[in-house]
Image (cartoon, rainbow, N blue to C red):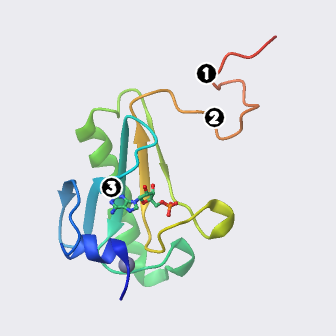
Amino acid sequence: MDCIFCKIADGTIPSRKVYEDERVLVFHDIQPQAPVHLLVIPKKHIASLEEVSPEDEVLLGQLMLAAQKAARDAGVAPDGYRVVTNIGPHAGQLVFHLHLHVLGGEKLAALNPKNPSDSDPSPS
Ligand code: AMP
Ligand code: ZN
């Protein structure tokens, strides 16, 4: 299958790995959007969250736990971090192999820019 993350999972394409076990791989995003930007993928090819089924229930838990571990190991857990997965064109999914983005290391922009918890200065 011509999938870049399958090739990263099988070692055909190199990556900066930070964690690996039998089912899950965590590596640095090649174009980081935050000081810490990691990708958590299943080694098994699944195109997106839309494609998972109940038999993937355990795997989904393993991906979330790997995201937690990666954030802790990267030192961003105390201040907080974001875990996000893009699904399909409206979300801007570019790589059609399920992945969790783990973002942290700075105050992240609010998902809703009108949210008053956003750090951006705004006129009162
Ligand atoms: P998405 O838009 O959610 O599909 O995100 C795909 C992500 O994969 C982007 O943040 C890319 O920078 C990242 N990416 C693409 N190719 C590679 C690669 N070879 N190694 C690491 N990250 C990659
Ligand atoms: Zn794949």
Of mark 1 and mark 3, the one earlier in the sequence is 3
**Residue 20: which quarter of the image?**
bottom left
Q: Amino acid at mark 2?
A: Ala
Disc sitting over residue 65 in the figure: 3
Disc sitting over residue 119 in the figure: 1
As measured in the structure, the alpha-carbon distance from the residue carrying label 2 to the one carrying label 3 is 24 Å
Q: Position of residue 66 (x, y in %)?
A: 30, 56
* Location of residue 114 with respect to 44 vertically, above or below: above
| Label 1 Cα neighbours within 10 Å, binned few <14 / some 14-19 / many ≥20 | few
Q: Position of residue 92 (x, y in %)?
A: 61, 61
Count up the numbered dots: 3
| Label 2 Cα neighbours within 10 Å, binned few <14 / some 14-19 / many ≥20 | few
Mark 1: secondary structure: loop
Disc sitting over residue 13 in the figure: none
Give the quarter of the figure containing the N terminus.
bottom left
Q: Is 20 on the left or on the right of 65, as rendered?
A: left
**Residue 75: which quarter of the image?**
top left
Of mark 2 and mark 3, the one earlier in the sequence is 3
Q: Give the residue at mark 2.
A: 110
Q: Position of residue 103 (x, y in %)?
A: 43, 42
Q: Residue at x 26, y 64 (%)?
A: 25
Q: Nearest the camera: 88 or 55?
A: 88
Mark 2: secondary structure: loop
Q: Amino acid at mark 1?
A: Ser
Q: Position of residue 91 (x, y in %)?
A: 64, 61
Q: Residue at x 27, y 47 (%)?
A: 69
The answer to whether the residue labelled 1 contacts the one labelled 2, judged by CB atoms less than 8 Å apart, is yes
**Residue 123: which quarter of the image?**
top right
Q: Is 90 on the left or on the right of 48, as rendered?
A: right
Q: Residue at x 51, y 73 (%)?
A: 48
The residue at the far right in this view is 124
